[in-house]
């Protein structure tokens, strides 16, 4: 994967996910492809992924045809949006289910209090 550097471009991160996913089973790579397109799976997609997962282990009904996984590839993710500006988080207000912050508290962030390079990568 690409090394972590200040100013890390999200497009590189997305391509890193594509490369990382190559080690995953086909059903997971197919799920990533589907999620990259719509961010949610309908019941038909869940059924198809279920079949892709079970087929190699002979866990489908007799006579079921082999499902074909369409795995995540570079052409499934955006190459970029041209020049996009920096995104700055200025405050968190009315948090729900956030540790150590009450729902009536606000967290105000000064310029550069939280940067992408402060967040550890967990891929």
Image: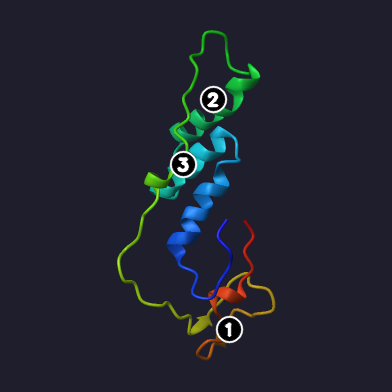
Task: Classify the position of the C terminus by image quarter.
Answer: bottom right
Label 1: state its secondary structure.
loop
The image quadrant of residue 107 is: bottom right
Q: How many marks?
A: 3
| Residue at the spot 50% in from the left edge and 17% down from the top edge | 66
User: Which residue in the structure is indicated by mark 1?
Assistant: 104
Marks 2 & 3, CB-CB < 8 Å contact:
no
Q: Nearer the viewer, mark 2 or mark 3?
A: 3
Q: Nearer the viewer, mark 3 or mark 1?
A: 3
CA separation, marks 3 and 1? 42 Å
Label 2: state its secondary structure.
helix
- Of labels 2 and 3, earlier in sequence is 2
Above or below — where is 100 with respect to 51? below
| Residue at the spot 44% in from the left edge and 32% down from the top edge | 44
Position of residue 34 measured from the top left corner of the image (x, y, whole percent): 44, 42
Label 3: state its secondary structure.
loop
Task: Classify the position of the N terminus by image quarter.
Answer: bottom right
Return the residue nearer the eye: 122 or 101.
122
Position of residue 119 measured from the top left corner of the image (x, y, whole percent): 61, 72
CA separation, marks 1 and 2? 46 Å
- Of labels 3 and 1, earlier in sequence is 3
Q: Is residue 86 left or right of residue 99?
A: left
User: Which residue in the structure is indicated by mark 2?
Assistant: 51
Return the residue nearer the eye: 120 or 43.
120
User: Which residue in the structure is indicated by mark 3?
Assistant: 72
Label 3 Cα crowd, 10 Å radius (few <14 / some 14-19 / many 20+): many
Return the residue nearer the eye: 88 or 17.
17
Numbered tag placed on residue 15 in the rendering: none
Above or below — where is 121 with respect to 101? above
In this view, which residue lies farthest toward the top?
63
């Amino acid at each position: 994967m690409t090394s972590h550097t200040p100013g890390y471009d999200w497009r590189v991160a997305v391509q890193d996910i594509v490369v990382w996913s190559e080690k995953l089973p086909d059903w997971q790579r197919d799920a990533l492809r589907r999620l990259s397109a719509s961010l949610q799976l309908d019941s038909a997609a869940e059924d198809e992924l279920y079949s892709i997962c079970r087929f190699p282990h002979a866990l489908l009904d007799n006579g079921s045809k082999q499902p074909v996984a369409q795995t995540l590839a570079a052409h499934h993710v955006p190459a970029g949006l041209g020049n996009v500006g920096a995104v700055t988080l200025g405050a968190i207000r009315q948090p729900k289910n956030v540790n150590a912050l009450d729902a009536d508290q606000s967290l105000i962030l000064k310029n550069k209090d939280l940067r992408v390079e402060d967040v550890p990568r967990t891929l």
